[in-house]
Image: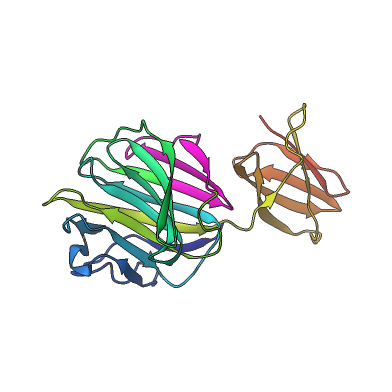
Amino acid sequence: MAVLDTDTFARTVSAGFGTASDGAMWTQQVGHSTSVSVGSGKGLVAYDAGARDLLTLGSTTTADGEVLARFTPQSSTDYIGFVVRYGDASDYTRITLHGAKFVSVESVVSGVTTSYNVSNSFFYTNGKAYWIRARFIGQTYWVKVWADGTNEPTSWLGTITNTAGPTTAGKYGVYMLSGVSGNTLNVDSLSFLDSASPHVFDAGLGSEGLLLAVLLGLVDGGSGAETFAVNKELLTLVFTLRDGAVRLRTRDGLAAFANRDGLARLRLR
């Protein structure tokens, strides 16, 4: 996956989020810049009479990708999370943690909202920071949430198929709503990644746990990485071509090999 934009929020801005650490400009699409600021290494969103704040980052668009950031909710009426595939204020998808325990994917199309429940049992603690990671490819969304200071879960919290929302490329950013007067939400350590155009396999896994993949266009001595979507999970394979033979491994070091015809066989364990 290629990094599209990142923001460390290491700056001070009195109104709006300003310019991100990677040089991209934040744009307030919904809400009021007077309730949004940056300080102490965080993007801050103050209570604004229950109004939501939606900000997009930069001018790059993507149809598929992955987002990650750390957020801190302050009440059970807050919304914290991301906006993806943003076309305008009437057409986009948001991925949020809200209502004390809900993780949702909600798509707005022509002003009409359709909601999908990823989980209704992730109980968060007000004032505590949480990481949210979400991946979206086509109509499928994967989401995981975990408390700051704990290990990221190896499995997704939940997966949904969003048949109502947009699948075309759009902008990306954050969606935050402070539900209680006097409270201020925050976000930091934010990154947006492209999906690297994953190839979707129908072959799946055989009885011996072998993944079959055809790798084409390699030059002898060359190397690279490719990301594949297999059984609704992304698998990144690092491959090299030496003396006519493709050698393949996963990024976390699982053993793999391929024959000289370019048919890669990866033993999963």
Looking at the image, which is closer to me, 215 or 249? 215
Look at the image and tell me whether residue 40 can be seen.
Answer: no
What is the quadrant of residue 253 in the picture?
A: top right
Q: Which residues are magenta?
A: 133-162
Check the image and name the residue furthest to the left: 182
Check the image and name the residue furthest to the top: 207
Look at the image and tell me whether residue 195 can be seen.
Answer: yes
Q: Quadrant of the C terminus?
A: top right
The residue located at (57%, 50%) in the rendering is 139
- Residue 255 in the image, given as x and y percentages of width and height: 70, 36
Q: How is the image coloured?
A: rainbow
The residue located at (51%, 41%) in the rendering is 160
- Residue 181 in the image, given as x and y percentages of width and height: 12, 51
- Residue 247 in the image, given as x and y percentages of width and height: 76, 46
- In this rendering, position of residue 83 left or right of residue 181: right
- Residue 174 in the image, given as x and y percentages of width and height: 35, 58
